[in-house]
Image (cartoon, rainbow, N blue to C red):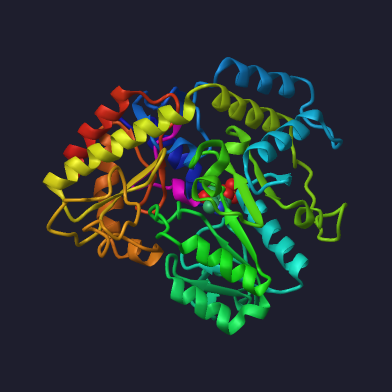
Amino acid sequence: MNHEQSRALYDRALSVLPGGVNSSVRATRPYPFFVEKGDGGHVIDADGNRYIDFVLGYGPLLLGHSLPEQVQSAIQQHAAEGPMYGAPTEVEVELAEFVTRHVPSVEMLRFVNSGTEATVSAVRLARGYTGRDKIVVMQSGYHGAQESTLVEGEGDHTAPSSPGIPESFAEHTLTVPFNDEEAAHEVFEEHGDDIAAVLTEPILGNYGIVHPVEGYHETLRELCDDHGSLLIFDEVITGFRVGGLQCAQGAFGIDPDITTFGKIVGGGFPVGAIGGKSEIIEQFTPAGDVFQSGTFSGHPVTMAAGLETLRYAAEHDVYSHVNELGDRLRSGLQDILRDQAPEYTVVGRDSMFKVIFTRDGPDSFDGHCEAGCRQQESCPRFDYCPKNGGDVKQAETERWERLFWPAMKDRGVFLTANQFESQFICDAHTGEDIENALEAYKEAI
Ligand SMILES: *Cc1c(COP(=O)(O)O)cnc(C)c1O
């Protein structure tokens, strides 16, 4: 595989962009390939190499790169007619109506421009609504590049995880390990009256894909209710991917107070949203007092792309197609691991998937979770499968990143750049893509 053009572009990029990229995860070793264009479920790089694309923009591209006619023409029309105004437009109302109709807990929402902006505003809203400062997040959960959640450490011994963030931010952020009900009880026993909100992804999607154990979200919901705290589901990845149009909260039957969205809801354009009960969302200015504003928020081109993408998914078999391919891929991966690396764990559900290079596994595969880890106690892998971000960190992350990722790239399969980020299937993927990907895994594992 020739990479001369990508190498030359990276050389130029390194002089003008820090690390040669605009988002740190893109700086794969020794240098990233530069994408020339997308084609269905594939991308083609600057040297003409073609890859099956399981990165899909790190989540937003539910339909893949070749957008259906109705999505394309809505985008082009709104781009040609404006592109934006500083006054409201009908398409914002239509997308908001669509989301509130399909996502059980969402009665109202505010659109912003990124997932990060959504979680920043959600935390501010929860603090404003409750009059409390503390938030609880999952250890090594990810909610974007925001000051309040870039923390490390345990319980109330937290510190900023990046230079440039004052210690005082971390003072208000408490951490618990995902899936640990006891730790959640303890943090509420100690700090319950000061906790504005618990902020979690329904399924960790930025830390290897970790499914909740049965009853975990119910416990968080109960603790929040008992202490007057809000439950915030960060559905930036899972929204309109897991559970289809009802999102992960519908699949799990959990009723969060606030939900953050991003990625798919903008149909491939920059987006975020904060949704929830009217009583809470109406605390945002100008209806309420919690300041929230944005020049590009509710951008007509983004709104049109998101709306037509979701309409297309509602009118076609998009979710059954991607979920069926997901099951096929995860089952196939399990078969490969059984022969070649029985200690590794297949994770994910619906159209999310990953293989975690766990170091230990059970002797038997009998009664194993099918098509991806669901944290079932009856599974022989239950004592070995990662329960939280810390467990994923203990896996062979260096082997994954330095040896496995490049080996898959050389075989024409584009995976997310490290052990932690989820991978996705899109509507444009085919059974043949899945078979080819499984062949590549077989060789590269
Ligand atoms: C991607 C992501 C974010 C951040 O979204 P950006 O659009 O990258 O700012 C926040 N939370 C979760 C769960 C995400 O996956």
Our reading of the magenta stretch's main secondary structure is loop
Magenta region includes residue 32: yes
Question: The C terminus appears in which quarter of the rendering?
Answer: top left
| Point 61% across, 46% down: residue | 261
Residue 115: horizontal and vertical position, in percent?
Answer: 61, 49
Can residue 406 be seen here? yes
Q: In the image, is 402 to the left or to the right of 37?
A: left
Q: In the image, is 288 to the left or to the right of 391?
A: right
Q: Is residue 374 above or below residue 313?
A: below
Magenta region includes residue 17: no
| Point 76% across, 72% down: residue | 131
Q: Is residue 92 above or below residue 18?
A: above
Q: In the depicted view, which residue is nearer to us: 378 or 125?
A: 378
Q: In the depicted view, which residue is nearer to us: 276 or 429?
A: 276
Q: Is residue 313 above or below residue 396?
A: above
Residue 421: horizontal and vertical position, in percent?
Answer: 41, 50
Q: Residue most toward the bottom?
A: 190
| Point 55% across, 27% down: residue | 313
Magenta segment boundaries in residue numbering: 23-35
Residue 173: horizontal and vertical position, in percent?
Answer: 59, 73
Can residue 164 be seen here? no
Question: The N terminus appears in which quarter of the rendering?
Answer: top left
Q: In the depicted view, which residue is nearer to us: 60 or 35?
A: 60
Tell me which corner region of the image, top left, top right, bottom left or bottom right, holds residue 122.
bottom right
Tally of numbered discs: 0
| Point 79% across, 43% down: residue | 295
Q: Is residue 183 above or below residue 190?
A: above
Q: In the image, is 438 to the left or to the right of 58?
A: left
Residue 88: horizontal and vertical position, in percent?
Answer: 84, 35
